Image: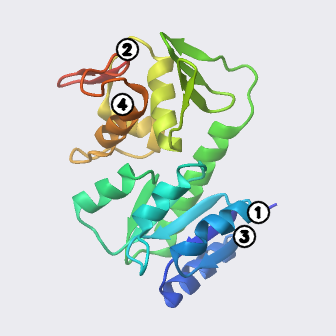
Amino acid sequence: MSDKILIVDDNHEIRNIVSIYLKNEGYEVIEAEDGYKVLEIIKEEDIDLVLLDIMMPGISGIDICNEIRKDYMMPIIFLSAKDTEIDKILGLSSGAEDYITKPFSAVELIARVKSQLRRYKRYNQADNNKKVIEIGNLKIDSNTRQVFVGNKEVFLTAKEFEILELLGRNKGIVMNIPKIYEVVWGEEFFKSDNTVMVHITKIRHKIEEDPKKPIYIKTVWGVGYKI
């Protein structure tokens, strides 16, 4: 069964071009011209990945991403003409796994889609040999991809979970930012990239009682992070 990808963009030409790219690679495609029907489609269809425009009439891609992340963990890739660093940070901090600026090539788009699907499937395969990681009141269940603080479940995006799991499996070891990025994203790290920092901040707000005084994810200044 082929992977099913949802394209959300108010521009018909872009939807059509992206759809052709994806269908040529064997993917099943569903299109939406605005964000209002996205959640309805996701509830009815088994969507494996979402390609999401940011600037759309009515409801923005950022807001749609936030709504999706309340209940779903499939990869989300933003397709946007907004190309500043702050735009990318805002997009990634809303829960997206990747951010592609327009215009983009078929090669780049397909490579990013395949990368995200491959990583998502790898981390979601049932593996009964994996153990639950417990650190104080923090519990990371790799089998179900659930995280609990005490008896309360906290909901992380796919990338947030992968970062937390990576740190948890390397408890006490300081991991530098390039290493975290390259393991989780599977790509070369660029010095000016704040992606890891943004995701760490989001994780802290979800698992720490006081994000400004974290007890789980510690910053080792000038080096990186550790649990």
Name the residue rendered at 41%, 74% in the picture. 104
Residue at the spot of label 2: 173
Please name the amino acid that badge 3 sits on: Gly
Image coordinates of residue 201 in percent, x first then y, are 32, 36
Residue at the spot of label 3: 26
Kindly tell me whether residue 121 is visible in this rendering. Answer: yes
Residue 12 sits above or below residue 101 on the image? below
- Residue 98 or residue 37, whichever sits in front: 37
Residue 168 horizontal side relative to residue 49, left or right: left
Report if the CB atoms under discs 3 and 2 are less than 8 Å apart: no
Residue at the spot of label 1: 2
Estimate the spatial distance between the alpha carbons at disc 4 and disc 3, rounded to whole Å. Answer: 39 Å
**Mark 3: secondary structure:** loop
Callout 3: 10 Å neighbours few (<14), some, many (20+)?
few
Name the residue rendered at 33%, 39% in the picture. 196
Image coordinates of residue 113 in percent, x first then y, are 56, 60
Image coordinates of residue 210 in percent, x first then y, are 30, 24
N-term-proximal mark, 2 vs 4: 2
* 3 vs 2, front mark: 2
Estimate the spatial distance between the alpha carbons at disc 1 and disc 2, rounded to whole Å. Answer: 39 Å
**Mark 4: secondary structure:** helix
Residue at the spot of label 4: 204
- Residue 143 or residue 40, whichever sits in front: 40
N-term-proximal mark, 4 vs 3: 3
> On residue 76, which mark appears?
none
Callout 2: 10 Å neighbours few (<14), some, many (20+)?
few
Please name the amino acid that badge 4 sits on: Arg
Estimate the spatial distance between the alpha carbons at disc 1 and disc 3, rounded to whole Å. Answer: 7 Å
Please name the amino acid that badge 1 sits on: Ser
